[in-house]
Image: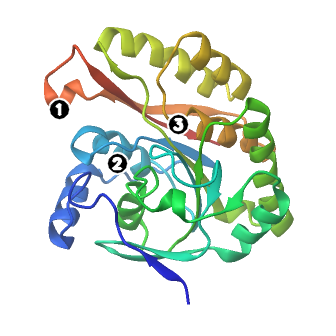
Amino acid sequence: MPTLRIPAVAGQFYPAAFSSLKQELNKLCPDIKQKKDAKALLLPHAGYIYSGRVAGITLANVNLKDIFIILGPNHTGAGEPISMDVEETWQTPLGEIKIQLELAKEILNSSSYITKDSKAHSFEHSIEVQLPFLQHFKSKFLIVPIIIGEKSLEIYKQTGRDIASAIKKLGIQDRVQIIASSDMTHYESASVAENKDKKAMDALLKLDPNLLFDTVKQESISMCGYAPAIIMLEALANLGATRAELIKYENSGATSGDYDSVVGYAGLIFN
């Protein structure tokens, strides 16, 4: 029997009570009738009061599938460098979510760098905060959660190729979406953040993992999920994606009123 991953940040990043969380999600997620197809999304992962509007409107624009490979950065430093949780059922205040074991095992078999490891996931928020949003839009779905630490560009790219290979081997391209979880620039002025984030988003819109890596490093962009984004972009290159679209960008100043030190949030879709 799988063990249960108890929410680590319910009551901090989002409401812990079922009714309060439903009410919050109803406010953050507009009802958009004309949906767009997407192979992947980039979504923010801050507290809902700050980044929830970006996440909600981005997801509201998309025809969501029933399997999500969710790639998040490692904020805690725990666990293996690239860690997949395959042994837990994930719980949120809205219910339980199971792992798609067939795909998870195929990715592990395909990859030299992804390790089966639950420790990195125990207190990490970057995947957890995506799940109630997905539950708001989908009553049933499965996940493959992967937390990414600091490795080389080539390891990130190979990991993306391995993920794409596993998806294609199982023939489930039409059932899978990849989510890269990332906030953008951290704790700079709104004008500096917007300038830096535009450069990173330009690389994302060009579907160019090399350009994203170089831009983040050369411009000192504190985009915490650049590694998940690179893995996603490389997987997309092997899954036939040809275009990207920015759905919404804003920063924490829109909530806090403090534009001297902001965090940037972007919602993009890829197809």
* Secondary structure state at the residue bearing disc 3: loop
Q: Which amino acid type corresponds to the residue marked 1 in the rendered image?
A: Thr
Q: Which residue is mark 3?
A: 225
In the rendered structure, are the residues bearing label 3 and label 2 in contact, judged by CB atoms less than 8 Å apart?
no
Whole-percent x, y for residue 110 in the image = 84, 59
Please tell me how crowded label 2 is: few (under 14), some (14-19), or many (20+) other residues with Cα within 10 Å.
many
* Residue 37, x across and y down, in percent: 58, 50
Q: Earlier in the sequence, mark 1 or mark 3?
A: 3
Q: Amino acid at mark 2?
A: Gly
Residue at left 83%, top 53%?
A: 112
**Which residue is pictured at 66% across the width and 23% down the height?**
213
Quarter of the image for the C terminus: give it.
top right
**Is residue 217 in view?**
yes
Q: Earlier in the sequence, mark 3 or mark 2?
A: 2
Horizontal and vertical percent for residue 41? 54, 45
Q: Is residue 79 above or below residue 206?
A: below
Which residue in the structure is indicated by mark 2? Answer: 56
Q: Which circle, 3 or 2, is nearer the viewer? A: 3
Please state, as top left, top right, bottom left or bottom right, where the N terminus lies in the image. Answer: bottom right
Residue 64 seen: no
